[in-house]
Image (spheres, grey):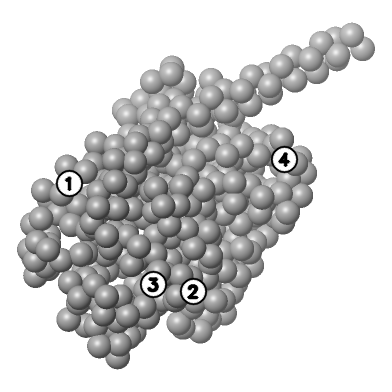
Amino acid sequence: MRVALVHLRQSGTGGTERYLDQLAAHLVERGHAVTAVCRSHEAPPRPEVEFAVLRPPSLGGAWRTWAFARAVERHVASAAYDVVFSLGRTWTHDVIRLGGGCHATYLELSRNGGARRRRGWLDRLRDRVVLDIERRGLAPGAYAAVVTNSRMVKKDVMQRHAVPEDRVTVIYNGVDLQRFHPERRRQGAALRKDCGFADGDLVVLFLGTGYSRKGLAPLLEVFPAFLRVCPRARLLVVGYDSQRHHFERQAERNGIAAAVRFLGGRRDAEACFGASDIYALPTRYDPFANSTLEALACGLPVVTTSANGASELIDPGRHGSVIAAPAAAEALYRELVFWSDAERRSGAARESRLLAERFPQERTAADSAALLEAVAAEKKRRRHAASLGGEAR
C-alpha cells in the first residue's frame, strides 16, 4: 500500500520524529511504499522512504502551522495514498495520532498552572490555531481511527471531542532497549565523576525540557528535607529551559545549590540514567513521557505522577511510585525516602528492566503498522462495495 506519514518535520531528534522514522522503516520492511509529508526533513530512515515537502509561505508559528495543514489538505487530494497517517495538527487523514495529547488539556494542566512568564499574543494566537486544527481533525467523519499513547489520553479525547471508544486505539510508546540498558552504568560512572559525585552518593535524576511542566519546582522544594535524612543525596538536572536561572536561584534560596548540578540539554540521556539511582519526574502533564520507559530500561525506579500517561505501566512499590498531580511536597518526599533504600532499589532494578522489555520500539512500530493496514483494507473494501453498488444502479 501507499502510506503517507504526515508531520511538520522529519528529524532524528524528538519523540514524535523518532516514532515517524521507526514506523517508516518498519513499513518499508513490510513491503509498503512510504512518503513522509513534511515541511522540512533530514536523512530518510531508509533509502526507500520518499519525501513530499510542503512549504507554503508563512510568517510566524501560528501561520506556519495553519498553512501546513492547508497544504496537506491540497496534497492529499491530488495524491493516491491508500492511507494517510497524521502525527498531529492536520485535519486531512485516515488515522491521527495524538502524541501530545489534547491541546486544551496541555494548556490547562501545564501552562496555566506552571508557566513562569506571561504568554504574549503570538502564543495565544498559536494556541487558538492549534485548538481549531484539533477540532477539525477530530470532528465526525474526519478520521477512521485515532491513536493515543496512553489510556489517560484516550479518556480525554473521548470526553473533549466525543470520539467513540471503538475508534480509539492505545499504542504505548516504545523504547530502544539496546541504547537504554543497565550496562550504561559504565558510561554513567564517568558522568558522575565529571559532576563531582562520589561513589556512595545517591543521585536523583530529573530530565526533561520545560522545567515548570515537568515538575522541577516541587522537587527542589522537597530536596532540603530529603538531604536531612539522606545527606549524600545529589540532584542531577538535565534538559533545556529558557528560564533555567529561576530554578538555579530556587536551589540557592533553599540552600541546596552544592547538592544540585544543572547540566542543560544533552544528547546522552543513556549516560544520565546510568549515572543515577532514582529517576524523578513529578510532571504536571505528559501524555506519555518517553523518559519513563528509558529509566525503567536502565533499571531505575521511577517516581512520577498520575498525570504522566506512562505511569499506567508502573506497579507502585515494584517499579517506582505514582503520586497525584500536581505533585504534593509531602508525597514526593515520602517516595524519595522510600527509594533511598539500596536494597529496595536493587530489587526494583531487575523488575524495571523486565517491564521495559515488554515495550520495545519495534513493537510500537508493528502495532501502528498493523492498524494502518487494517484501515487501508477497510477503505478498499468500502470502495469496492461502492463501485459494485454503482454498477448495479
Mark 2 and mark 1: Cα distance apart in space: 32 Å
Q: Can you tell which quarter of the image residue 43 is in?
A: top left
Q: Amino acid at mark 1?
A: Arg
Camera-side mark, 1 or 4: 1
Asked whether residue 264 appears in the rendered view, the answer is no
On the rendered structure, is 390 left or right of 257? right
Mark 2 and mark 4: Cα distance apart in space: 32 Å
Q: Residues within 10 Å of mark 4 (few under 14, many from 20)?
A: few
Q: Quadrant of the C terminus?
A: top right
Name the residue carrying label 4. 165
Name the residue carrying label 1. 184
Residue at image location 63% in from the left, 47% down from the top: 154
Q: Amino acid at mark 2?
A: Ala
Name the residue carrying label 3. 333
State the image coordinates of residue 160 (x, y, percent, origin top left). 72, 56
On the rendered structure, is 202 left or right of 195? right
Residue lying at the far right in this picture: please name it: 393
Q: Amino acid at mark 4?
A: Glu
